[in-house]
């Protein structure tokens, strides 16, 4: 899969500054309590952070209800995915959906493996075809749920059934970078799947819903028998002290409650935006992430160029579609305006 951001330089005649809706960032700034913590911690930047992220690991273990030996902390979920891919075994292949997070092919290659991309079932990973692609050469299976860039969510029963058909010793990595934005009650819950399976490795991040993308901190919940080798790699690539402190503070009940209200508001804005774009006649896939997917096929690049000319950057997968982050209310209004103009010109 190839993807790109179609960039633009703002015209002198355009009053509005460009808006970047290509990175799946949250439109919200960090909460005031987190900003204050980071400011106050700036005076300790001459000290190295805790390489093992012991306090954050303990906080996550307590919140999730697992032992600390099941938690890995790293500089975002993508590096942790890399660590797991390197640690999980010598087999040469990683099975993954064909249209998914653009970073996976690079992470797989960096781990000395080759990807086995499995064609999609519409907007969703084809679990039956992925199961059929598993062989003795498979190192692990890699899934993103909700899937990036299409926004599709796999339901709990179907993913549990898929896991039951996997070899019991085959790791299945489930990347839940967008889990907090899911409001489909039948969606798979990675933590439940982890508890019911001996092979699930769960990835989550503080970059998206927790508004800490600039600090780069994520975590994995991994069967302890699989965690040791990955933990060695994680000790080399660890989050900074302010990242650890901000992530830990985000787990506090009062802070978490305010964050949950933001997640609900953003999910509602996403659903409203989908309805409005469909009302303009644009095709929009169902989404459970903080982004939407327009399956425009061969028109994807042209739409992205049209958006760029209006000062809005989106993520394009050539020949497939356009992924658009749910931005602020003004950004959403600009998106609707340029989309209406696009439809009039078709």
Image (tube, rainbow, N blue to C red):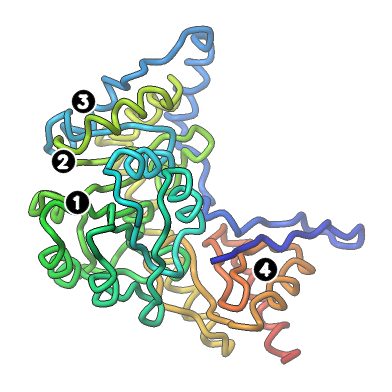
Give the label, 4 or 2, closer to the camera: 2
Ranked by sequence position, the earlier of labels 4 and 1 is 1
User: Which image quadrant: the C terminus?
Assistant: bottom right
SS for callout 4: helix
Left or right of 159: which side holds 98? right
Do the residues bearing badges 3 and 4 touch, measured as CB atoms within 8 Å? Answer: no
Label of residue 200 in the image = 1
Disc 3 crowd, CA 10 A, few/some/many (<14, 14-19, 20+) = some
Q: Calculate the distance from the C-alpha at mark 1 to the C-alpha at mark 3.
A: 20 Å
SS for callout 2: loop
Q: How many marks?
A: 4
Ranked by sequence position, the earlier of labels 1 and 3 is 3
Q: Residue 255 or 311: which is nearer the viewer?
A: 311
Disc 1 crowd, CA 10 A, few/some/many (<14, 14-19, 20+) = many
Do the residues bearing badges 1 and 2 touch, measured as CB atoms within 8 Å? Answer: yes
Q: Calculate the distance from the C-alpha at mark 2 to the C-alpha at mark 3.
A: 16 Å
- Residue drawn at (28%, 54%), measured in percent from left and top? 140
Q: Residue 252 or 152: which is nearer the viewer?
A: 152
SS for callout 3: helix
- Residue drawn at (75%, 74%), measured in percent from left and top? 306
- Disc 2 target residue: 223
Q: Residue 100 or 107: which is nearer the viewer?
A: 107
Ranked by sequence position, the earlier of labels 1 and 2 is 1
Which quarter of the figure has residue 246? top left
- The extreme left residue here reads 196
- The extreme right residue here reads 12
Left or right of 122: which side holds 293? right
Label of residue 259 in the image = none
Residue 5 location (% of width, % of height): 67, 60
Label of residue 58 in the image = 3
Q: Calculate the distance from the C-alpha at mark 4 to the C-alpha at mark 1.
A: 41 Å
- Disc 4 target residue: 334
């Amino acid at each position: 899969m190839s993807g790109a951001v179609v960039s633009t330089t703002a015209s002198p005649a355009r009053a509005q500054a460009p808006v970047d809706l290509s990175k799946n960032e949250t439109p919200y700034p960090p909460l005031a309590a987190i900003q204050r913590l980071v400011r106050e911690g700036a005076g300790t930047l001459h000290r190295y952070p805790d390489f093992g992220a012991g306090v954050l690991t303990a906080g996550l273990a307590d919140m999730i209800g697992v032992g600390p030996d099941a938690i890995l902390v790293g500089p975002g979920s993508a590096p942790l995915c890399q660590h797991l891919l390197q640690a999980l075994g010598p087999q040469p292949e990683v099975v993954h959906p064909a249209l998914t997070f653009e970073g996976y092919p690079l992470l797989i290659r960096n781990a000395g493996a080759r990807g086995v991309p499995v064609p999609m079932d519409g907007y969703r990973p084809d679990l039956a075809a992925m199961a059929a692609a598993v062989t003795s050469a498979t190192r692990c299976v890699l899934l993103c749920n909700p899937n990036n860039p299409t926004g599709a969510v796999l339901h709990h029963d179907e993913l549990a059934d898929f896991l039951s058909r996997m070899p019991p010793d085959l790791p299945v990595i489930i990347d839940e970078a967008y889990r907090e934005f899911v409001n489909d009650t039948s969606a798979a819950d990675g933590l439940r799947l982890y508890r019911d399976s001996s092979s699930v490795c769960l990835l989550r991040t503080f970059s998206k819903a927790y508004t800490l993308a600039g600090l780069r901190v994520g975590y994995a919940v991994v069967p302890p028998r699989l965690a040791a080798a990955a933990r060695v790699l994680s000790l080399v690539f660890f989050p900074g002290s302010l990242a650890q402190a901000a992530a830990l503070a985000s787990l506090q009940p009062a802070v978490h409650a305010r964050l949950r209200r933001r997640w609900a508001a953003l999910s509602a804005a996403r659903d409203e935006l989908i309805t409005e774009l469909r009302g303009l006649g644009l095709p929009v896939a169902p989404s459970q992430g903080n982004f939407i997917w327009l399956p425009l096929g061969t028109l994807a690049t042209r739409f992205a160029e049209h958006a760029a000319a209006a000062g809005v950057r989106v993520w394009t997968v050539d020949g497939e579609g356009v992924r658009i982050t749910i931005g602020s209310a003004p950004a959403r209004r600009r998106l609707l305006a340029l989309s209406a103009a696009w439809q009039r010109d078709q």
